[in-house]
């Protein structure tokens, strides 16, 4: 059974969890520092680049940063991420092997789901907190409202296609604890711009 206290604490630290693709290791710490300075302290570093694990280790050194790994596909990815210092795991989907690996490592897992069947398989694993992914492609807010009406005890982190403009609409849903977004660090790396975006994101109020 999932420890919802731990995962809820992660999902409610910041209204937006930045989805980070770190291509240059030298940018890892400055990026984390800019986000934390802007009030965004939960950071998801995706395993999409060769330096991702090193970036997790570097970002974890930043005071106030709570760093996890994203795009985790299997138990091996999970193990390497935890060894690098990841405090939570985010995946695009859910498999039995991944759920077992997270339980064995005692690390909070936020697995991706796209439909009712995915949620039901997660419930079989004792999970009640999920990433709705890819959010806009899978029907957007109307789809998540429909799923939430059936699964009333589930809380979500919608990710995929969410923007600074649409994030407040998602966060207004009672079933949404936070959203994932890549816009905070999109474009050419610029620490002042990232801090400005983080300040705006951290100011979004959860209305329900």
Image (tube, rainbow, N blue to C red):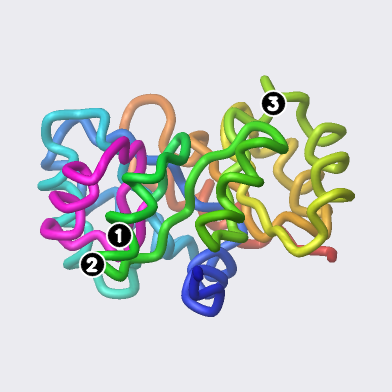
**Secondary structure found at label 2:** loop
The residue labelled by disc 3 is 136
> Residue 33, which numbered label?
1
Q: Is residue 179 left or right of residue 94?
A: right
Q: How many residues crowd mark 3 within 10 Å: few (<14), some (14–19), many (20+)?
A: some
Labels 3 and 1: the sequence-earlier one: 1
Q: Is residue 200 visible?
A: no
Instruction: Give the mark toward the camera: 2 or 3.
Output: 3
Disc on the earlier residue, 1 or 2: 1
User: From where the camera sits, is residue 164 visible?
Assistant: yes
Residue 113 rendering spot, x and y as whole percentages? 58, 38
Question: Measured from the top left, where is residue 55 in percent x and y?
Answer: 17, 47
Which residue does the image show at 75% across and 53% down from the upper left?
Answer: 171
Does 13 appear above or below 52? below
Residue 62, numbered label: 2
Residue occupying image coordinates x 50% and y 69%: 2
Frontmost residue, 135 versus 206: 135
Name the residue at 35% across, 61% down.
88
Query: In the image, which residues are magenta?
Result: 67-89
What is the spatial separation of the Cα atoms under label 2 and label 3, in whole angstroms?
Answer: 32 Å
Using the rendered view, name the quadrant where residue 92 is placed: top left
Residue at 17% in and 43% down: 76
Residue 101 among magenta residues = no
Q: Seen in the image, is 147 located left or right of residue 22?
A: right
Indicate the position of residue 135 as horizontal and vertical percent values: 66, 31
Identify the secondary structure beneath mark 1. Answer: helix
Nearer the camera: disc 3 or disc 1: 3
Q: x, y (%) of residue 16?
A: 57, 53
Q: Is residue 132 left or right of residue 191?
A: right
Cα gap from disc 1 to disc 2, whole angstroms:
6 Å
Whether residues under marks 1 and 2 lie with C-beta atoms below 8 angstroms apart, the answer is yes
Compute the Cα span from label 3 to label 1.
29 Å
């Amino acid at each position: 059974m999932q420890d919802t206290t731990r995962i809820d604490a992660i999902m409610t630290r910041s209204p937006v969890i930045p989805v980070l693709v770190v291509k240059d290791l030298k940018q890892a710490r400055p990026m984390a520092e800019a986000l934390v300075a802007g009030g965004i302290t939960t950071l998801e570093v995706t395993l999409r680049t060769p330096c991702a694990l090193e970036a997790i280790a570097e970002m974890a050194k930043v005071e106030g940063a709570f760093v996890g790994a994203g795009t985790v596909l299997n138990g091996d990815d999970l193990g390497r991420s935890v060894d690098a210092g990841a405090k939570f795991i985010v995946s695009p989907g859910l498999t039995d092997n991944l759920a077992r690996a997270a339980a064995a490592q005692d690390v909070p897992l936020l697995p991706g789901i796209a439909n009712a069947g995915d949620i039901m398989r997660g419930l079989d694993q004792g999970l009640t907190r999920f990433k709705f992914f890819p959010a806009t492609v899978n029907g957007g807010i109307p789809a998540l409202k429909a799923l939430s009406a059936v699964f009333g005890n589930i809380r979500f982190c919608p990710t995929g296609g969410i923007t600074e403009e649409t994030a407040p609409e998602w966060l207004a849903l009672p079933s949404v604890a936070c959203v994932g977004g890549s816009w905070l660090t999109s474009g050419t790396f610029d620490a002042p711009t990232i801090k400005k975006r983080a300040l705006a994101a951290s100011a979004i109020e959860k209305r329900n």
